[in-house]
Image: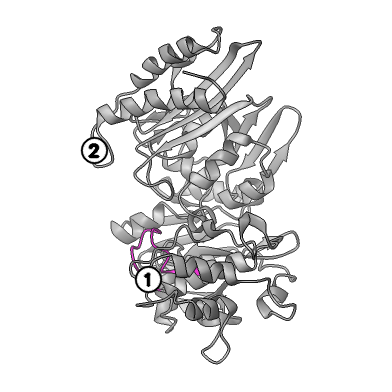
Amino acid sequence: MTVTVTVNGVPTPLGGGAHTTLLSALRARGLTGCKEGCAEGECGACAVLVARAEEGGTRWDSVNACLALLPALDGGEVVTAEGLGTPQALHPAQRELAARGGSQCGYCTPGFVCAMAAEYYRPGRTPGEHGAPGGFDLHALSGNLCRCTGYRPIADAAHALGLPAVDDPLLARTQAPAPAPRATALHAPDGAFHRPATLPQALALLAAHPGARVLAGGTDWGVEVNLRHARAPVTVAVDALPELRVLEENPDFFLLGAGLTLSELERRLNGRVPLLADWFPQFASRLIRNSATLGGNLGTASPIGDSPPVLLALEAAVVLAGPGGTREVPLDAYFTGYRQTVRHPDELIQAVRLPKPLSPLAAFHKIAKRRFDDISSVAVGYALRVEGGTVTRARIGLGGVAATPLRALEAEALLEGQPWTAGTVRRAARALGASGTPLSDHRASAAYRAAMLEQSLLKFFVEQGGTL
C-alpha cells in the first residue's frame, strides 16, 4: 500500500490508501509546510508544484494537494515549499515575500510560495507582460487566500520577481522530460485504485466494476472524499490515457480531449475558440484549472457546472467510448436529470466535439457573489451570428436555473430570423428571464436568478455594440 513519488528531487515511498490525499502523505513525512485550510481547494494553503509534460520537457504546475489522491501521483514528481529553498538559501519567491512583508501568521505563505514559483517558471513569461515589470500574472495566485496580511505586499513580492537565473536548478529541470504516467494497481482496506495503461483496460475495469469512480483531475471527488468522507470501492484514474488527451482542429470541428486540464486547453487553443477563452479565467482558480478537466466537469453532471452553458452555446457533442466503440451524443441530449446523464456505467467521456464555423458573437456571463473563484448562481453562454442586421443563428446555454443545464430555446427562437435591435433583444430577454425552474437557495433567490437572466441578455447586446 505504498506508491513512489519523487519529492523535492528524492524518490520517496509514501504510504496510504486509495483515498489518502497527497497533502496527508506529505505531512506524514514531516513536510508540514503543506497545510490544510479548507480541504476543498478554496484557500491554496496546500499548494505544491507537480511536474507535467510540456513539449518534450517539463512544466511546473501548482495544484491543490488536498484534492490530489496520492495513488494518482504514483511515479510522479512533486516539489513542496521546503524543496524550493532553505533558510540559508531562499528561493526568490520566498525571499521577496519575506522582504516585502508578504507573510504575517505564515499559515498561507507556503501555498503562496508554490503558486508564485509556478508562475515564476512559466514558459514564455516576459517583462512587461500583464502590465507588470516582471510579467507576473497575478491571476496565478487567484486560488490562494490570506486572511491577515492583505494582498498588496504579496502582489509587491510577485511583481518584484525577475526571470529565473540561468543556473536555477528548477529551471534546468524543465529541460528534461517529465515522468511518464505509471500504470498503478493499489489495493487497500479503503478500496482499490487503478490507473490503467490503455483505454481498453480502463473500459474493462468499468465493465467489471459498474460502481467504480472515474477520476480525472479530482477537483470534485476530492471535496467529497475530504468533507463528506465519501469512499469508492474501486477508483479508475483516466487522466493519462492518450485517447483522452487529444486536441485536434480541422475545417469541420474542434476535438477536445476529456482528459486535458483546463489550463492545457487554454494554452493550446490560444484563443481559437473565443467563447472558451472568455470562460477559462472565470472557472475557479488557476490551482483548480491546473487539474480540472472538461470530462470531469461534464461527468459530475452538476446543474451549476460552468462548462455546460458554454458548451451548449457552442452546440457541443460528447464523444463516449464504450465496449462497442464510440458514440456521439449532442450535449443538449446528454443530461437526463439531476446529476444524471445518458452515459452508461461502462463508458467514458473521451472527448468533446465543437462544430465549425463558430458563431462570431460570443460571451460567457457568470453571476456569482465574487468576480472570480466562486460557484455560479446563474451562468449563461452566448453564441450568435448576425448577418445583414438579422440574427441568423442563436444558441444560449444556461446553468443554475434547473435540475440540468439547458438551452434557452424560447429566447433563441425569438432572436432567430429577427433584426438585431433593442426591441428584439428586450422580447427575448423577457423570455430568457422565464427560463428553467429556478429555486431559492443560499446563493440566490429564484427572483434574483430570473432577473439576472433577463439582464444578462441586455448586457450582452450592449457589449456587442448595441444601444438600449
Sequence-first disc among 1 and 2: 1
Give the answer, above or below, for where 26 lies relative to 221: below
Instruction: Report which quarter residue 10 is drawn in.
Output: bottom right
Vertical arrangement, residue 68 with respect to residue 1, above or below: above
Percent coordinates x, y for residue 269 in the rendering: 67, 43
Between 341 and 59, the one nearer to me in the picture: 59
The label shown at residue 441 is 2
Give 458 or 82, whichever is nearer the viewer.
Answer: 458
Rendered residue at 29%/28% (across/down): 438
The residue lying toward the viewer, choosing from 252 and 426, is: 426
Callout 2 amino acid: Asp
Residue 404, compared with residue 426, is above or below; it is below
Amino acid at the residue labelled 1: Thr
Front residue (pair 267, 428): 428
- Secondary structure of the residue carrying tag 1 is loop
* Helix, strand or loop at mark 2: loop
Q: From what the image shows, is residue 380 above or below residue 46?
A: above
For label 2, the crowd category at 10 Å Cα-Cα, with few meaning under 14, some 14 to 19 and many 20 or more, is few
Name the residue carrying label 1. 149
